[in-house]
Image (cartoon, rainbow, N blue to C red):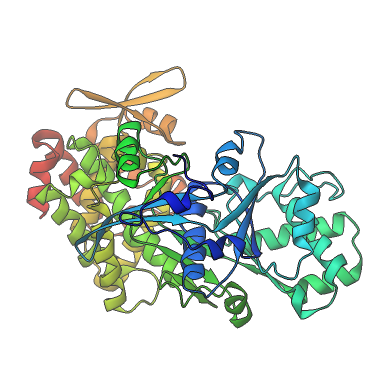
Amino acid sequence: MILSNQTLKSISAENVSIPDNSLLQLPEKVLQFGTGVLLRGLPDYFIDKANKKNIFNGRVAIVKSTSKGDLKDFENQDGLYTICVRGLENGQPVAENIISSAISRVLSADKDWSAILEIAKKTELQVIVSNTTEVGIQLVNESIELNPPLSFPAKVLAVLYARYKALGDSPDSDIAVIATELIPENGKKLEGIVYELAAFNSLERGFSTWLKAHVFFCNSLVDRIVPGKPDHAALEKLQLELGYKDNLLIMAEPYRLWAIEGNERVSELLNLESADRGVIVKPDIEIYRELKVRLLNGSHTLACGIAYLSGIDTVNKAMNDTTLKNYISDVMQNEIVPAIPYKIEADVAFTFAGSVLDRFANPFIEHFWINITFQYVMKIKVRILPVLVQYYKIYNKVPPHIAFGFAAFLLFMRTSRKENDKYFGDFKGREYPITDDQAAYFYEKSKLDTSAYVKSVLTDENLWGTDLSAHTGFIETVEENYNYISMNGIKEGLMQTN
């Protein structure tokens, strides 16, 4: 039995939350660009939850912008899919199965563009959500009369222009446009491109006035690990437990955050905050970005080289290693929290740090450390350097755990060989790929002896944008850690640090 509107009544509610039939009749209030698991596991999760609490009372019409894949699974299942929430929350296990009825239908931009424009004209529509990847929010000067326009911003402009022509200067035309792409100022960047495209298309002045008055472009931050469909064996086991087949089933961790930068009108249009504490609408969401980037992403970055070179392949396995778990906890609480370069109350930061430890320990999500080493240099620069600088401003001494993380980073990035355009490191006979834009740079630096290698990299202002020797004792401590690890191993070095 496959999940669908027709089979809902045959599914037992013993192991899964089933939507009431009335929820399948709700109007389309959201136009969503993207079918990906993050959108289905976070914004659509919140919308489904709000509908079940009789708060939002609207469904999502999804636009599939690319020609890859097909819509058969969505069509066969009437947009229904199961979210299996697994993990830890406040140290306690969480296991929840939810059939989401948030999606009304999925439309192809190539085949259903006129139907998409018709949705834009309806007063029921209140929100546009997007996740088109970072590449999606790019300016392409093109006509919005194309069927459809090629670029995502041009599609948004065409939708908004159709809405303007249909509804005019009416309060019912108000709409929030919320970008979730993983780039800084995602909503504002989209807004700027839309205005440029309006000028390129020579749209009338009245439309620009309407845009400013009735369209609210919002930056947003999304934070939830949604691995998507589990492997075949795990999927079969879940479907046996649920009693039906679901080709759209996704896994998600319990933690969830959708922080949206917006005013009271955006909050009214979205109307999700009272449904779940994970939805936040505020004029300034920088605090949430800082917490995520410094504590979650930052501790990931500092620990990835340490864990991988220790022979630990996944994040959750690292949390079963007492020494590494203590390192992650200590670096967050003792070095990152006090030096986050943004004013954050200590209890807020420590609470977030606790949730990070829960998330790292989640046994249901396989997050590989080697994947976290991708673009290692950029991650150190963006996530760790501002904390290091701030730590020295406050304490004017070496943060020992950050210094150890730098030593592991340098060991990991030390390149042993090059094959065509691929680079490889080697630690104690174990070879691994180095996937980084700076791999060629490190290949050349790795020809130096140990002391010269460490000093040459860490004093390179072109690489870091600063000379790290300005921080008293830092380079010397990194080199000491580097030498100790090289001789004795990572775990022995960790024990010295802890």
Q: In the shown orientation, is residue 275 left or right of residue 24? A: left
Residue located farthest toward the bottom when viewing the structure as drawn: 264
Work out which residue is located at the far front of the displayed protein and give it: 10
* Residue 2 against residue 421 in the figure, above or below: below
Residue 233 makes an appearance in the image:
yes
**Which residue corresponds to the image point at 46% horizontal and 46% vertical from the top-left?**
462
Is 422 or 295 nearer to us in this picture? 295
Give the quarter of the image for residue 88. bottom left
Q: Whole-percent x and y of residue 30? A: 63, 62
**Residue 257: quarter of image:** bottom left
| Residue drawn where x is 73% and y is 46% of the image | 151
The quadrant in which the C terminus is found is bottom left
| Observer-nearest of 333 and 77 | 77
Relative image position of residue 320 (x, y in whole percent): 13, 48
What is the residue that sits farthest to the top in this orientation?
A: 420
Which quarter of the image is occupied by the N terminus? top left
Evaluate whether residue 338 shows in this view.
Answer: no
Q: Position of residue 294 (x, y in %)?
A: 35, 61
Position of 7 compared to 190: left or right? left
In the rendered view, would you say 228 is above or below 431?
below
Q: Is residue 452 left or right of residue 222?
A: left
Residue at (18, 57) in percent of width and height:
400
User: Could you tell me residue 103's position as x and y percent?
Assistant: 57, 55
Residue 383, picture quadrant: bottom left
How many callouts does the rendering have?
0
